[in-house]
Image (spheres, rainbow, N blue to C red):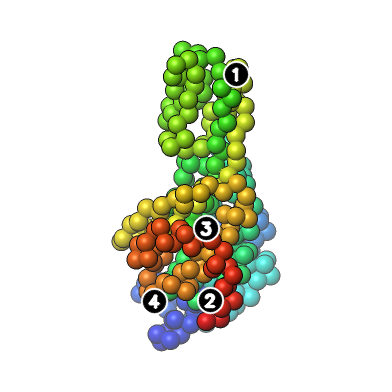
């Protein structure tokens, strides 16, 4: 059987990528940021054996691919996994599947990454599926500054924060400072008999909170640090953080929506968001993202 270019393009839009040198395809099954139920896992395994070659792989975007699906079995595969509430996709010049770390269960996680990324998945991966962009648009959520899923190498990335609050009145100026010892980067230092935490160097990992025996650092401020303009591949760009740290989830997610709208309106065809940011200037883009003008013009941008 010979697959035409138009047929290959059509099924690629459905999440089926041709296996090199064959007329078979890898079916890209969408997860919610890497999460599936045990029953869904069983369904995927059964579909892989029934319609593919029985091989299941994971992608870098935490989707699942079942290899070796013949062209004439694509619709059968899609119907089979649909009974478990699953679908294929995740390709094209639009918002791609969202990636998150396991910050919800990880001891270092500072935000509920599963919950945050699920909201992003529903609002922007599902909600913007019909919105064509200049290029693919990737979003990642990390639970802490350990940066395990590399949010700063995505078009927009969120990193959970827990900024320590130091009560100087309780500091004893210990020669061996417990919060300095607890800090992976040893940023807290004792100067003139008092602990100091340099806000320009602190990564807000929160590892020092609760470590002072005199309770000088017993609490912190939870928040979200947002990076824009990252990418990896043949051309790598390290995303830059916005100057504002957000204490409310809705503020951080609004930045994502405004970034998508800005890319839709001001990005050039074939251009990645990192290139859009570079071309327009980071300061210009940041100013737009921190205002509400893009949201005010949302309907005009999407329908323009």
Residue drawn where x is 59% and y is 70% of the image: 296
Q: Which of marks 3 and 1 is nearer the N terminus?
A: 1
Tell me: residue 107, above or below residue 17.
above
Q: Are marks 1 and 4 in contact (CB under 8 Å)?
A: no
Q: Mark 3 to mark 2: distance in Å?
A: 17 Å
Q: Mark 4 to mark 3: distance in Å?
A: 25 Å
For label 4, the SS is loop
Identify the residue position indicated by label 2 in the image.
301
**Where residue 269 is drawn, which disc sits there?**
4
For label 1, the SS is helix
**Where residue 290 is drawn, which disc sits there?**
3
Q: Which of marks 3 and 2 is nearer the N terminus?
A: 3
Residue drawn where x is 44% and y is 16% of the image: 192
Q: Are marks 4 and 2 in contact (CB under 8 Å)?
A: no
Q: Mark 4 to mark 2: distance in Å?
A: 15 Å
Identify the residue position indicated by label 1 in the image.
170
Residue drawn where x is 48% and y is 29% of the image: 197
Give the x, y percent position of residue 73.
Answer: 54, 78
Q: Do the residues labelled 3 and 2 touch (CB within 8 Å)?
A: no
Give the x, y percent position of residue 59.
Answer: 47, 59
Q: Mark 3 to mark 1: distance in Å?
A: 37 Å
Q: Which of marks 4 and 3 is nearer the N terminus?
A: 4
Give the x, y percent position of residue 128.
Answer: 57, 71
In the rendered image, is residue 234 in sight? yes
Q: Mark 2 to mark 1: distance in Å?
A: 53 Å
Task: Please count the marks in the image.
Answer: 4
Label 3 CA crowd tier, 10 Å (few <14, some 14–19, many 20+): some
């Amino acid at each position: 059987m010979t697959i035409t270019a138009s047929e290959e393009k059509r099924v690629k839009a459905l999440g089926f990528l041709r296996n090199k040198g064959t007329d078979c395809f890898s079916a890209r099954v969408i997860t919610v940021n890497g999460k599936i139920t045990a029953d869904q896992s069983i369904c995927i395994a059964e579909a892989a054996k029934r319609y593919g070659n029985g091989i299941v792989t994971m992608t870098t975007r935490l989707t699942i691919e079942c290899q070796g699906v013949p062209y004439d079995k694509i619709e059968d595969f899609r119907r089979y996994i649909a009974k478990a509430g699953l679908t294929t996709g995740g390709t094209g010049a639009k918002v791609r599947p969202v990636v998150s770390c396991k910050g919800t269960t990880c001891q270092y996680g500072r935000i509920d990454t599963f919950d945050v990324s699920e909201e992003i998945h529903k609002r922007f991966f599902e909600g913007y599926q019909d919105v064509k962009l200049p290029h693919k648009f990737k979003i990642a959520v990390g639970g802490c500054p350990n940066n395990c899923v590399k949010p700063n190498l995505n078009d927009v990335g969120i990193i959970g924060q827990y900024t320590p609050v130091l009560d100087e009145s309780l500091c004893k100026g210990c020669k061996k400072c417990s919060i300095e010892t607890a800090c992976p980067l040893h940023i807290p230092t004792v100067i003139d008999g008092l602990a100091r935490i340099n806000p320009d160097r602190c990564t807000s990992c929160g590892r020092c909170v609760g470590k002072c025996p005199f309770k000088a650092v017993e609490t912190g401020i939870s928040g979200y640090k947002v990076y824009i303009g990252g990418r990896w591949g043949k051309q790598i760009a390290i995303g830059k953080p916005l100057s504002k740290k957000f204490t409310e989830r809705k503020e951080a997610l609004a930045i994502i929506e405004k970034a998508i709208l800005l890319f839709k309106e001001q990005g050039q065809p074939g251009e990645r968001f990192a290139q859009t940011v570079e071309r327009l200037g980071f300061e210009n883009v940041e100013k737009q993202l921190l205002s509400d003008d893009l949201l005010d013009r949302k309907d005009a941008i999407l329908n323009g």
